[in-house]
Image: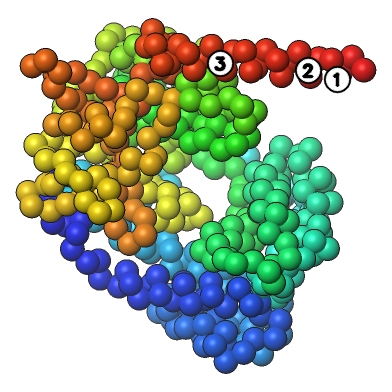
Amino acid sequence: MRADLLSDPVEGLDEALAAVDTFDGALVAGLLRPGAAQAAAVAGLAEAVAGTPLAARVAEAAERAAAGAAGEDHFVALAAARSALLGSVHDALAQRIDEAVGRPAPEVESSPAVAGEKSTPAAAGPEHGANLLAAARSWLCDLARSGWRGIDHELVAGAAPVVSAMLPDPALRRRATLLDGFAAELAASCPGATLERVPVRRWADLWSRALLLTVPGSAGERPDGSVTGRLLPLGIDVQEHATAVQAQVHAVFEPADGGAPRLVRAGVSAPKPDTVVGAGLWQLLRPRMSLLGAVSEGRSMELDAMPVTAEGDLVWDDERARAGEPADPFATARVRLSAATAAPVVPLDRHPVRIAVPVLLEGYAAHSEECGLAFDLAGRPLAVDTDRMPAAGPLTPEAVAASHACVGLLRWDAGEFLLQPLAVETTVRKKTVAVHAGAWAGGTTDKAGVRAEKAATDAVAVLRERAGRLLRK
């Protein structure tokens, strides 16, 4: 890897982020009665997209917003401009990563994104729940007018009937979930006038994405297909919250027809009680996806017509997969990873926070800095994000610090590239030993893992018994 490319500045990056940050600041106080600073912020956003097809609409929206007379269409245009700027940042950073690791850039095309897949045309038809989308858009525009400092329980509660009406419809559930989570965060922070700190970027991200998803056709059926071939897992990324957990397997897919290898993902999620933590999480996820067991055992999987999205996400079906031959993730990374291409990213998903590129690093020296652990690559430091490593596996910061090879996800956050380790190779008693974050996914004999699983089993059993008692009443 050319670490120098990761530390060199990206042209135009700071200017694009500055325009977004300034606009996000305007949303803090709201755009109902904008002052001079807020008017300048929306004008700056319009200026940043002046050379794009959005220029005319955003310029009009900025003028109306500066006068405090913005309507729904104007707020949508401003959200689109913000999303376009962050999309350009995403693309620039993704291109820089491809150059640094020497990997082929993803092909931007409308045809199926994964080699070896059979495409199925999306069903065309009118947008579901147009009235509900309009109601959601109206609520989001009211938020922009009030600003984060102006939110109160009455305003936030306006989302509840819209979400309740959306949730029963599978076609609207994606938007409903986003609105529900966003409204819950706002409700927990009311009244906004008393907030010590406003999560400016996060709430602006949620607001703009939700607003764009209310535009008819924005979340239409994505082109889906199916793939047949061999799946070679690289590692598991675990994302845990108080009431939910998700495991995402990153892998290289080799099409049965001999096509070029591709980077794909397969995810599984489950609701969870907040008492289930650590290795106990796998009990909730394991029954839902056989792939987790294959990763734990170090095996490939043979896929037969497995559904896949255009973005390279496998829609996992255990009936279409069977365990294959042993496959070492480090061998896969050394032989196939550099030639594997990624699927193109759809416009609404082009955001720097989405970047998570599988990479293999070798020959580095690990050392501690004031901000944490870093890998020295030919004299250039690469920060290691050990906070993202799950407690549901044996991979620890100590193992990473003692390693000499690492398979991880290259991310970008707070103005710099970071590495999230998925697995490392280290030397124990003169032997090379691999330690994987997802090693306990299919079960474990490790003492710490066994204790955590038993604690989770007891907690789940108690909760089920209590739930059964409540249902009987």
Q: Quick check: 183 above or below 1?
A: below
Q: Which mark is residue 466?
A: 2
Residue in front for this viewpoint, 375 or 223: 375
Label 1: few (<14), some (14–19) or many (≥20) C-alpha neighbours in 10 Å: few
Rendered position, 247 above or below 150? above
For image coordinates 54% across by 88% down, the residue present is 37
Q: Where is residue 63 drawn, in percent x and y?
A: 60, 88
| Residue drawn at the location 39% of the way across and 20% of the way down | 228
Quarter holding the N terminus is top left
Q: Secondary structure beneath disc 3?
A: helix
x and y percentages locating residue 316 in the rendered image: 50, 23
Q: Which residue is mark 1?
A: 470
The amino acid type found where label 3 is placed reads Ala
126 vs 472, nearest the viewer: 472
User: Going from the N terminus, do you reach mark 3 or mark 1 first?
Assistant: 3
Position of 212 compared to 309: left or right? right
The structure residue drawn at horizontal position 43% and vertical position 16%, both measured from the top left corner, is 449
- Kindly state the secondary structure of the residue where label 2 is placed: helix
- The reply to whether callout 2 and callout 1 are in contact (CB within 8 Å) is yes
Residue 353 spot, x, y in % from top left: 42, 52
Foreground: disc 3 or disc 1: 3
Type of amino acid under label 2: Arg
Residue 82 horizontal/vertical position (percent): 50, 69
The circle drawn on residue 312 is: none
Q: Report, in whole angstroms, how far the alpha carbon at label 2 lies from the one at label 3.
A: 17 Å
